């Protein structure tokens, strides 16, 4: 679960991406031609007012949604050219998601939630168990492995969600408002953890956030406004 | 931990709701099992009928007796091996609600023709020796608690004794049946006793013979002999209608008119109603799971997995409920056989009925899960993730 | 403190929001209602055709012990003795007793839709027609003439039984009888074929008759006559009123249909009720926050309980409406089955009566109420703080 600086993977290249939805009868343009390069192993904060298109951009990079136009390349893979099932397979190997409301499966324990994405990897039962355990150790919750989400605090739930995101050793961690439901102390702990994922494990971390404190933990902050790039700031 | 863990935990998540749904399926399949078994039981009398017996009745009416002189004339028809006289007695034991069938027959010929009527040699000898003796079915004996040696008083409705006195028959044997065409709820007594009572005993009632059971010689074509018998009596006192035993039995089923169709219709309505109940539950379930399905896809599971999980959950739910209902249906076989001993003699739940039942339960589950599953397939991940839990 | 109730619009709106789920449980209830009322309407039709017909001032004489005409047998000389000697029998203007010795037999006839069935044929005397009077209406053709090989056929039989249309010839043993009339009669007689009793006796070579039917003089108590004739030396008879006789002929089938209707309707109802409970549970579950808000606004638990209960009663009501719509087209459809009391085919129609509509509606609303009780109780028992906190 480590990579040296030479063969760092997780480089994202976005070119001319457009996306619009039909809401009711009118068509709403969410992204009107975005070009962006993100280097591997960086923490990038995507910021901007509501409706600026930052969540949509994140979903497009993660392959949860399909762009109308343009091209998104992650390392050597042009993900905009993949079919739905190919995208799913690609996601299972290369992307880990973290959501604002954690989205843990309530009927499964912390350990089982982390094991869930590993079902898609060619691993034995014992390997899955061990790898999930390791991921929980990284987020400091090995002692809560048998608890269900309902028995954990919000901060702990989000840390389990991060463990789930990294369990299969993906190249990208995509986080949508990861601190939105947390208090300051817990939010800072989560941000700290995401930064460590980039610094120590070489992951590329892309997070959509409203949290101004988040940019302090990011290598780079990208501002979006009305579906277009409004500025890029390097820390 | 596997996807099955998820499935199992999800089923247990809403214990009350899923239990109610499974219970609804159980109730429906119990009802199906009962209605279907009524139909198969009625039909089994036809399918298991003997291939060497024909029944001769009046062409005018089943309730019109034939002249006694026909007995000897029938015996002379080519291909006839033996002729037994049968008269429906229609007596009442204490109250009309205690209805069961009683026939006056030629005992020796009857026993020779109906090998499926199983009694011991001692019982046989005792019955033949006693003109007022009778043979009763095992189910009948159990229902009224009759034993060998008991006297059964019957008030005649067709054959009435002077002053309305009761007929008395002594139980000489209790038979069991080795085939479903012969039920175990009938009382048989000697034709000669009935005839003698009409001739000398002041009994009123039809003097002829209700129907003749004719056993044919081996190798005789049933189609030909039925025609031969009817042709023999054309022009005689009464025209006859001769049918194979199967056709004769089938006649009683067509007499039920639209009842079997009515039962099937009800069965269909029940299953249809349950289908709605299952679809309803699975829709509620699927709505709750929307977000979970989004998460699974975000983790890299294929889109179809979510739909399959829903489908499988629904089939599992219905399968379990169905098994419970069918188990109840199978285990109450004996109770219903006792309860409807005289109306639906020999009520039997056939293995095939249970197999069909399981298939129906799974089909209802599949159909119930299909709609929500298709809905889940059509969902965009980004929307699913935004859904309210 | 006055009970603060929630407006009626609240449960109505809630039903609309969850309309698919509400519709599914309503349909479940509707199907139960449909089956329940179909069976009961069959019973209503059967009763209309039999037990609720027959006159109080007409007596039926059967052989003692017989429970139906088919089992009875009365010799002709006994019949003459009865007609002439019984003081209770009314007479016509010429002083002739209004009494007829009738024969009855279940004919083995072919049904038009396949198979055979037992159709009752009644041998009548001229006096039979006089006693029936205006109750008997010949709707096509003419009444039979006595002394000829002619029959008239009850209206429903013409479309169900072979050789029963006007102008057809019906063969009975060696007799060939022409169908000269189609008749209608308020009750059970419409399932019958009528023929001159003497001609029928000649055709089937059976002189014995099955009953005497006679009009009573005004003020005669049939019960007294019955007691008198029960132990009579010369002509022992079982006597009962025509109405009572018909009622005794339907006992078994009528009660079987009632039991069947209640049993199957009940079992289906349970299943439908479980469906309604599920819908309401989901409705309550997804409105936890809403309940919390209502509680914090000061609505009482009873108000919330009643509101949810009303919602599920409305589901039941909708089910009743749909179920009855499904069943109403059955009204008037004629069907036949064998009445095992008489072993003859009885033709009768499905009858949807106002009482049945009411029963079915009550049945559906009760299903909805029972189904909704537990979920409504669950909603009413929530603590406001808990309800608000839950997501």
Image (spheres, coloured by chain):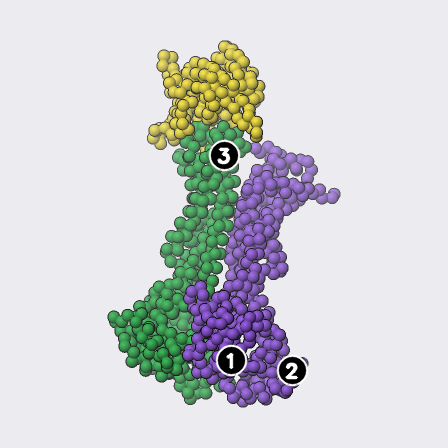
Chain colours: A yellow, B green, C purple
x and y percentages locating residue B47 in the rendered image: 35, 64
User: In 3D space, how far apart are the residues under numbered discs 2 and 3 (Cα atoms)?
Assistant: 81 Å
Q: Residue at x 49, y 72 (%)?
A: C167
Q: Residue at x 68, y 36 (%)?
A: C297
Instruction: Provide the chain ID for the residue under circle 1.
Output: C
Which residue is under mark 3?
Answer: B290
Q: Name the residue nearer the viewer: C362 or B377.
A: B377
Q: Is residue B25 above or below residue B340?
A: above
Residue C251's disc is none
Report the quarter where the C terminus of chain C lies: top right
Q: Secondary structure at mark 3?
A: helix
Q: Are marks 2 and 3 on the same chain?
A: no
Does the rendering let one see residue C241? Answer: no
User: In 3D space, how far apart are the residues under numbered discs 3 and 1 (Cα atoms)?
Assistant: 78 Å
Report the quarter where the N terminus of chain C lies: top right
Instruction: Provide the chain ID for the residue under circle 2.
Output: C
Q: Residues within 10 Å of mark 1 (few under 14, many from 20)?
A: many
Which residue is under mark 1?
Answer: C196
Does the rendering let one see residue B380? Answer: yes
Which residue is under mark 2?
Answer: C217
Q: Residue at x 54, y 45 (%)?
A: C24
x and y percentages locating residue B305 in the rendered image: 42, 35
């Amino acid at each position: 679960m480590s990579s040296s600086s030479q063969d760092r993977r997780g480089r994202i290249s976005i070119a001319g991406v457009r996306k619009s939805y039909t809401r009711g009868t009118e068509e709403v343009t969410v992204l009107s031609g975005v070009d962006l390069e993100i280097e591997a192993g960086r923490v990038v904060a995507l910021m901007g007012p509501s409706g600026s298109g930052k969540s949509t951009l994140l979903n497009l990079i993660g392959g949860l949604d399909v762009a109308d136009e343009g091209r998104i390349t992650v390392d050597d893979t042009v993900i905009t050219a993949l079919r739905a099932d190919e995208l799913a397979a690609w996601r299972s190997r290369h992307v880990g998601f973290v959501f604002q409301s954690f989205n843990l499966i309530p009927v499964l324990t912390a350990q089982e939630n982390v094991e869930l994405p590993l079902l898609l990897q060619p691993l034995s039962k014992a390997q899955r168990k061990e790898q999930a355990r390791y991921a929980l150790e990284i987020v400091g919750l090995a002692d809560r492995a048998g608890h269900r989400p309902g028995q954990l605090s919000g901060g702990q739930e989000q840390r389990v969600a991060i463990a789930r995101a990294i369990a299969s050793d993906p190249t990208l961690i995509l986080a949508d408002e990861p601190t939105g439901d947390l208090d300051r102390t817990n939010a800072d702990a989560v941000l700290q953890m995401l930064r460590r994922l980039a610094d120590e494990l070489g992951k590329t971390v892309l997070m959509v956030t409203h949290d101004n404190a988040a940019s302090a933990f990011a290598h780079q902050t990208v501002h979006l406004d009305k579906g277009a790039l409004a500025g890029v700031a390097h820390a | 931990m596997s996807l099955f863990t998820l499935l199992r935990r999800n089923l247990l998540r809403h214990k009350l709701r899923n239990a109610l749904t499974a219970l609804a399926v159980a109730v429906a399949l119990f009802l199906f099992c009962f209605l279907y078994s009524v139909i198969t039981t009625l039909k089994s009398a036809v399918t298991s009928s003997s291939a060497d017996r024909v029944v001769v009745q009046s062409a005018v009416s089943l309730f019109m007796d034939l002249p006694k002189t026909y007995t000897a004339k029938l015996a002379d028809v080519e291909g006839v091996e033996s002729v037994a006289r049968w008269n429906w007695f229609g007596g009442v034991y204490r109250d009309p609600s205690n209805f069961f069938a009683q026939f006056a027959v030629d005992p020796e010929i009857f026993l020779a023709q109906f090998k499926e009527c199983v009694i011991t040699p001692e019982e046989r000898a005792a019955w033949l020796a006693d003109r007022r003796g009778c043979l009763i079915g095992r189910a009948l004996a159990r229902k009224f608690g009759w034993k060998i040696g008991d006297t059964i008083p019957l008030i005649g409705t067709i054959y009435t004794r002077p002053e309305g006195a009761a007929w008395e028959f002594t139980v000489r044997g209790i038979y069991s049946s080795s085939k479903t065409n012969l039920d175990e709820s009938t009382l048989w007594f000697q034709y000669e006793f009935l005839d003698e009572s009409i001739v000398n005993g002041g009994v009123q009632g039809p003097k002829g013979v209700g129907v003749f059971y004719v056993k044919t010689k081996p190798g005789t074509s049933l189609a030909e002999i039925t025609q031969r018998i009817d042709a023999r009596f054309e022009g005689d006192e009464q025209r006859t209608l001769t049918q194979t035993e199967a056709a004769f039995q089938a006649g009683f089923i067509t007499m039920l008119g639209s009842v079997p169709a009515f039962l099937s219709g009800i069965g269909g309505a029940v299953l249809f109603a349950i289908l709605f109940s299952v679809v309803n539950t699975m829709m509620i379930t699927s709505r709750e799971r929307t977000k979970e399905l989004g998460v699974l896809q975000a983790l890299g599971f294929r889109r179809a997995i979510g739909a399959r999980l829903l489908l499988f959950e629904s089939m599992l739910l219905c399968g379990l409920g169905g098994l419970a209902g069918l188990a109840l249906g199978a285990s109450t076989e004996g109770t219903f056989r006792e309860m409807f001993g005289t109306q639906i003699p020999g009520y039997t739940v056939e293995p095939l009925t249970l197999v069909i039942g399981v298939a129906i339960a799974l089909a209802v589950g599949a159909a119930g899960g299909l709609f929500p599953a298709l809905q889940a397939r059509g969902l965009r991940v980004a929307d699913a993730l935004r859904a309210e839990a | 403190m006055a009970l603060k109730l929630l407006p009626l619009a609240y449960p109505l709106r809630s039903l609309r929001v969850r309309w698919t789920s509400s519709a599914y449980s309503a349909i479940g209830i509707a199907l139960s209602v449909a089956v329940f009322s179909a069976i009961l309407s069959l019973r209503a039709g059967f009763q209309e055709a039999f037990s609720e017909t027959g006159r109080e001032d007409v007596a039926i004489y059967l052989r003692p012990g017989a429970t139906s005409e088919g089992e009875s047998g009365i010799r002709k000389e006994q019949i003459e003795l009865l007609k002439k000697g019984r003081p209770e029998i009314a007479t016509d203007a010429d002083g002739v007793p209004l009494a007829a010795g009738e024969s009855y037999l279940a004919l083995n006839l072919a049904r038009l839709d396949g198979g055979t069935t037992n159709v009752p044929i009644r041998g009548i005397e001229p006096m039979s027609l006089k006693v029936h009077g205006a109750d008997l209406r010949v709707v096509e053709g003419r009444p039979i003439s006595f002394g000829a090989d002619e029959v008239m056929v009850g209206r429903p039989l013409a479309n169900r039984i072979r050789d029963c249309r006007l102008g057809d010839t019906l063969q009975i043993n060696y007799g060939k009888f022409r169908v000269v009339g189609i008749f209608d009669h308020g009750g059970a007689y419409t399932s019958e074929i009528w023929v001159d009793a003497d001609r029928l006796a000649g055709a089937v070579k059976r002189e014995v008759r099955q009953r005497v039917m006679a009009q009573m003089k005004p003020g005669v108590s049939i019960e007294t006559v019955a007691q008198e004739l029960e132990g009579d030396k010369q002509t022992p008879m079982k006597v009962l009123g025509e109405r009572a006789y018909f009622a005794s002929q339907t006992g078994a089938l009528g009660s079987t249909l009632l039991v069947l209707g209640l049993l199957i309707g009940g079992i289906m109802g349970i299943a439908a009720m479980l469906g309604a409970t599920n819908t309401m549970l989901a409705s309550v579950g997804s409105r936890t926050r809403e309940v919390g808000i209502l509680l914090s606004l000061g609505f009482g638990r009873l108000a919330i309980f009643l509101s949810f209960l009303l919602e599920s009663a409305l589901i039941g009501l909708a089910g009743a409406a749909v179920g009855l719509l499904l069943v109403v087209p059955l009204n008037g459809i004629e069907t036949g089955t064998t009445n095992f009391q008489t072993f003859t085919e009885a033709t009768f129609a499905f009858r949807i009566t106002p009482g049945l509509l009411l029963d079915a509606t009550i049945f559906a609303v009760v299903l909805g109420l029972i189904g909704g009780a537990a979920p409504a109780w669950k909603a009413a028992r929530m603590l406001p703080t808990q309800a608000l906190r839950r997501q």
